[in-house]
Image (tube, helix red, strand yellow):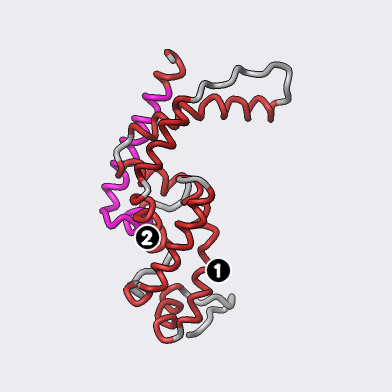
Amino acid sequence: MTARADGQVTDAELAAACRSDPELFTAVHDRYHRDIYLYVAGRLDTQIAEDITAETFLLAFDRRDRFDPGHESMRPWLFGIATNLIARHRRKEMRHYRALARLAPEPLAEGHENRVVASVAAQRMRPHLAKALAALSDGERDVLLLVALGQLNYDEVADALGIATGTVGSRLSRARSKILAIVDKETTHG
């Protein structure tokens, strides 16, 4: 395993080295744990996020010989594993979104600084956004949240979900349209 000029080892080199020296997998964990955790925590509650993140790295470790070193980064592969694990918890996720949608927005506070007003506005939008997320198909929700929470680009989302890049774009476009329509309807009529 050779380090680049900046001292970093590429993911492909790291994956290859982990096959013969499993101890090196801690570098994969150290490199991507925070990203995976933040993505999962954005989709599920923090307790489950800790469990799903741990399970993601456990599965990745067990399947480290399946990572294709032809890929530039292990990041999409790990996000794909995490997304599949989240799918197992989809019913709980849907109950969570439906519960958030039932929450009545709090009245707008008067006389507070802009930061407080922004916070209150965000709280008021939460039930509407949750209802909109619950209305998306599984594929649309996965793509939207991988982009929004995981901050993956189209190619990384495609790699993570095993779909074409064009499919990512169309699902994201449909998801955005649905979200905007539902939020607009909820905020003007709800």
- Helix, strand, or loop for circle 1? helix
Q: Measured from the top left, where is residue 179 in percent x and y?
A: 39, 30
Is residue 39 visible in the rendered structure shown here? no
Circle nearer the N terminus (1, 2): 1
Q: Could you classify mark 2 by the number of other residues whose Cα lies within 10 Å: few (under 14), some (14-19), or many (20 or more)?
A: many
Instruction: Tell me the quarter of the picture where residue 91 sits.
Output: top left
**97 to 31, vertically: above or below:** above
Q: Is residue 136 left or right of residue 18?
A: left
* Label at residue 81: 2
Whether residue 190 appears in magenta in the rendering, the answer is no
Residue at 63% over, 28% down: 118
Amino acid found under the numbered disc labelled 1: Asp
Q: Residue at x 46, y 78 (%)?
A: 14
Q: Residue at x 28, y 41 (%)?
A: 170
* Whether residue 127 is situated above or below residue 72 in the rendered picture: above
Q: Position of residue 107 (x, y in %)?
A: 60, 17
Q: Position of residue 177 (x, y in %)?
A: 35, 30
Q: Is residue 164 magenta?
A: yes
User: Total of numbered circles in the picture?
Assistant: 2
Depth check: give the residue in front, 47 or 134: 47
Which stretch appears magenta? 155-183
Query: What residue is disc 1 on?
Result: 30
- Dominant SS in magenta: helix
x then y, percent, for residue 29: 51, 68
Which numbered circle lies on residue 103? none
What amino acid does circle 2 point to?
A: Ile
Q: Quadrant of the C terminus?
A: top left
Q: Nearer the viewer, residue 69 or 37?
A: 37
Q: Residue at x 32, y 41 (%)?
A: 140
Count residues near mark 1 (Cα–Cα under 10 Å), then give few for <14, some for 14-19, many for 20+. Answer: few
